[in-house]
Image (spheres, grey):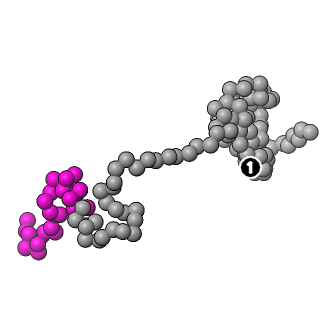
Amino acid sequence: MLVVNRVRDADEGIARANALPYALGGSVFAKRRGLELARRMRSGMTAVNSVLSFAAMPSLPYGGVGDSGFGRMSGEDGLREFARSKAITVRRAPSLLPIWTFKRDPDTTARRVMAIVRLLHGRSRLPQPPSAATRFRR
C-alpha cells in the first residue's frame, strides 16, 4: 500500500513523515535539496529520487527506527548486531591507592595521595592562599 498526501512545502512533508511511529525507509523526490531533505528524515534508510535503492546495496546497513524494529543487518553495523563486546582487565600490580577496598586506612591513603601529587607536580606542599596583607597590596 502506498499513501500519498499533499503538503504545503517540503518542511511540512518532513515534519509529517518524522511524526509517524514507523520509520523503516523512505524516499525523497526532489529536483533540488534532495540530500538535505533525506538527512532531515527520521528513517533507517532514505533514497533520493529512487525507491528501495538502498536494499540493493549489501554494504549499507538495513534496518528501521521507532516502531519499525531495531537493529541492523548488512554492512558493518549489521555485523556488529551479531557481536557482543566485552571488556576484560587483568590486575598486574597492586594499586598505589587502595581505593577499591574497605581495608584502606584514611591516613595512609592521604599520605599516598600527597606523595603522588608531589611526584606529578613537583611540590613539597600544597600552595597556601595569600594572606590578607598581600591580598590588598597593589
- Name the residue located 15 percent from the left edge and 57 percent from the top edge: 123
Q: Can residue 32 be seen in this view?
A: no
- Between 21 and 102, which is closer to the camera in this rendering? 102
> Percent position (x, y) of residue 53?
77, 26
Asked if the magenta segment contains residue 103, the reply would be: no
- Name the residue located 73 percent from the left edge and 25 percent from the top edge: 57
Q: In which quarter of the image is residue 133?
A: bottom left
Q: Quadrant of the N terminus?
A: top right
- Name the residue located 18 percent from the left edge and 56 percent from the top edge: 118
Looking at the rendered structure, the kind of residue marked 1 is Gly
- Between 33 and 77, which is closer to the camera in this rendering? 77
Mark 1: few/some/many CA within 10 Å (<14, 14-19, 20+)? some
> Percent position (x, y) of residue 129?
16, 69
> Percent position (x, y) of residue 104?
33, 68
Q: Quadrant of residue 138?
A: bottom left
Q: Residue furthest right?
A: 1
Residue highlighted by disc 1:
66
- Name the residue located 73 percent from the left edge and 46 percent from the top edge: 70
127 to 94, vertically: above or below: below
- Between 30 and 55, which is closer to the camera in this rendering? 55
Asked if the magenta segment contains residue 115, the reply would be: yes
> Percent position (x, y) of residue 76?
64, 32
> What kind of element bears circle 1?
strand
Number of numbered labels in the structure image: 1
**Left or right relative to 52: residue 33:** left
The span picked out in magenta is 113-138
- Between 43 and 30, which is closer to the camera in this rendering? 43
**Left or right relative to 114: residue 10:** right
**Left or right relative to 1: residue 71:** left
